Amino acid sequence: MESTEQTVTGTEVERSSKLQQGSILMTLAGVAFVGYGVVFLALNFLGSGFELGVSTLGGLTPAELNPAVAYYISHLHVATAAFIISTGIAVTALSWYGIQQRLRWAWATAVVAAVVALALALPMHWTGGAFAHDWLTHLGPIYLATAVFVVGAVLAYQGIAES
């Protein structure tokens, strides 16, 4: 009887390791995006009424705002949280299931989903405006998750490309 044993080279193990490490990092970042969205949503109903790292709007608390304006802001926060959470779910699923199977389209879709969300949302934070926010608590978590995602995306791509 012939042996069907295959030998695995060090390069193949390294490729597989990069793919797995990258996929796990991208998945963790996706979970962090979901967590950020959940905090965003919770603060709307249980916290300050403003988003993470924002305590007043032009010096006014939510209680001091016109009720219609406060409700409109709440409406936008809920919608924003929903899209942050749904993007995080998509990135998580694509990273864990698709990238683990070396599917380039899953990698590309996860990257595009995250890049589009961040490229559209983050520049507004650097334009100033009528409200002040604590940079560390407002943007720190999403920047950390993004850095983890980028490292993961690079590693996963290397693992996919080398196979």
Image (tube, rainbow, N blue to C red):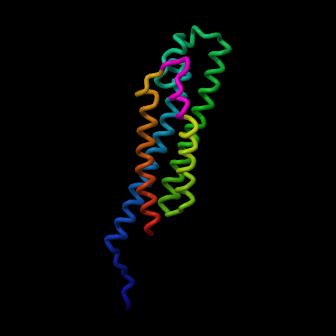
Q: Residue furthest top?
A: 64
78 up-or-down from 155: above or below: above
Which quadrant holds residue 17? bottom left
Between residues 142 and 28, which one lies in front from this camera angle? 142
Left or right relative to 120: residue 20: left
Between residues 46 and 150, which one lies in front from this camera angle? 150
Q: Residue furthest front?
A: 127
32 up-or-down from 15: above or below: above
Between residues 15 and 2, which one lies in front from this camera angle? 15
Residue 126 in magenta?
yes
Q: Residue furthest left?
A: 10
Which quadrant holds residue 85? top right
Q: Residue 29, image x and y in percent?
A: 45, 44
Q: Residue 126, image x and y in percent?
A: 50, 29
72 up-or-down from 113: above or below: above
- Range shown magenta: 122-132
